[in-house]
Amino acid sequence: MKQATGKSLNILIIADHASDLDWVQISLQDHNYQVLGQVFSIEEAAQVIERTPVDIILADESGEGVLETNWIKELAFKTNGCLVLVSATQNQMNFVREAMLAGASGFLLKPFDLDDLSKSIEQVYHLWLQRSTLLAESRSQHQAVDQPAKDSHSIALFSPKGGAGTTTLAVNLAIALKEETGIPVLLVDTDFRTADVDIFLSIFSKRSILDLVNLDQTVDQETLEQVISEHNSGIMVLRGDPQLQFVDTPFEPSQVGALIEGIVALWDGYVVINTSNGLDRWTVEVLDAVNTVLVVTRPELPALRVTRNFLELAEASADTTGRWKVVMNAYQGKKVLQTSDIEASIQHPITATIGEDTLLASTAINQGRPFVTSQRKSPLAKDIVALAQQIRMEQMSAAKMQSDDEAPRSEKKSDKSSTFWKRIPFWQSVSNSVRLTIW
């Protein structure tokens, strides 16, 4: 059997030495399949996949590690379009169900013959082909037409210490920007540890950021529209994928940076990005790709110390573009610390303060109704609306200055700093540096 491109499907077999599938390899080769060979464990299969493109894996229950179905999920994150067929006996239907839930495309019950195997391979391949054809056609159509430049502004919210309320702020800020400006807003969840923006907004969708990260080609407008969801507030949402928290290395960091840059280039409006707490390579890539970074902290000494360490690491004080802005969340006025004292401690100005109302914020999360709409007149909502208005005014001022400049648009955009992560050889050293005590 051949793909639409005319290339034979590459098939890899996983089975024990003493399995009853020895005939499969020879039979498939006789029927014009490209059989890469037979391996005896998941570990060996992973080594083959690193060296050679694999279209279909036929995994028998006798193979070492096959019954531990987590490998199927990991395979989906690390490859593009590799299909999995599992084979087992009638007595192992629990394994078959677990494999299908983990992402297997089909199964075969033993004993089976060559006709059963060929039909199963054709079925799973054509199902995958149908799903991918629409995306491939839309990509090719859009690649043939020059797309006009979009007037977008990207904002990442990041906290170097957990518990600062970054997700709450990101969700409510996105809605406030939409309501205050009338400009399209896209909220993107790149928190690969605890993706829960969809919970905050009561959004239910099978699509997630994982659908875009796994694409080989550049994301186009039509593809993006297929994976985002509309919230009743009017904002669009690209939700995260909770499964990513169980995978050590879901994808290369450069994939995330390229994805964010592609989305921002397509979106005509604001792109608000929720990130993970603490630095990893994926978060660094996001921060490097955006126009503005809101560094969210709290008026507590541990949070302020790690914020100061991060700002020094990012060389925020030397930045002349205004990308790095500190937002003080859960601020209780002068009851605890004055803003002037905090600014002196972290050696960076505070752009905005957001009040504290733990009960209101917690209720909004549990109900899936952001307080900036459900409790619009609350002091907490007013603080976030004020931040949205401030962002809009600053952007309008920057746009006016840019319009007075005769430099081409592409040259102006190059002014944004894009070397943050390049100063750090490994993301582990970034994390270690943030933890240093230099208070």
Image: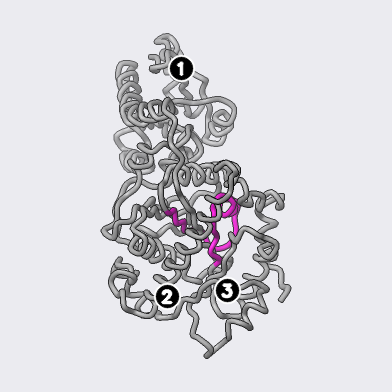
Circle 1 or circle 2, nearest the eye = 2
Label 3 sits on what residue type? Ile
| Tally of numbered tags | 3
Q: Which residue does the numbered mark 3 point to in the structure image?
A: 350
Find residue 212 and report its horizontal and vertical position in percent.
43, 41
Q: Which residues are magenta?
A: 270-295
The residue wearing badge 1 is 25
Kindly identify the amino acid type of the residue bearing the numbered disc 1: Gln
Is 22 situated above or below 365?
above
Left or right position of 260 against 178: right
**Mark before the other along the chain sequence, 1 or 3:** 1
Q: Can residue 123 be seen in the rendering of this structure? A: yes
Judging from the image, what secondary structure is the residue with disc 1 in? helix
Residue name at image x 35 percent, y 44 percent: 227
Identify the residue at the far top of this view.
Answer: 30
In the image, which disc is placed on residue 383?
Answer: 2
Q: Amino acid at mark 2?
A: Asp
Label 2 residue SS: helix
> In the image, which is nearer the foreground, mark 1 or mark 3?
3
- The stretch drawn in magenta includes residue 300: no
* Crowd band around label 1 with a 10 angstrom C-alpha radius: few (<14), some (14–19), many (20+): some
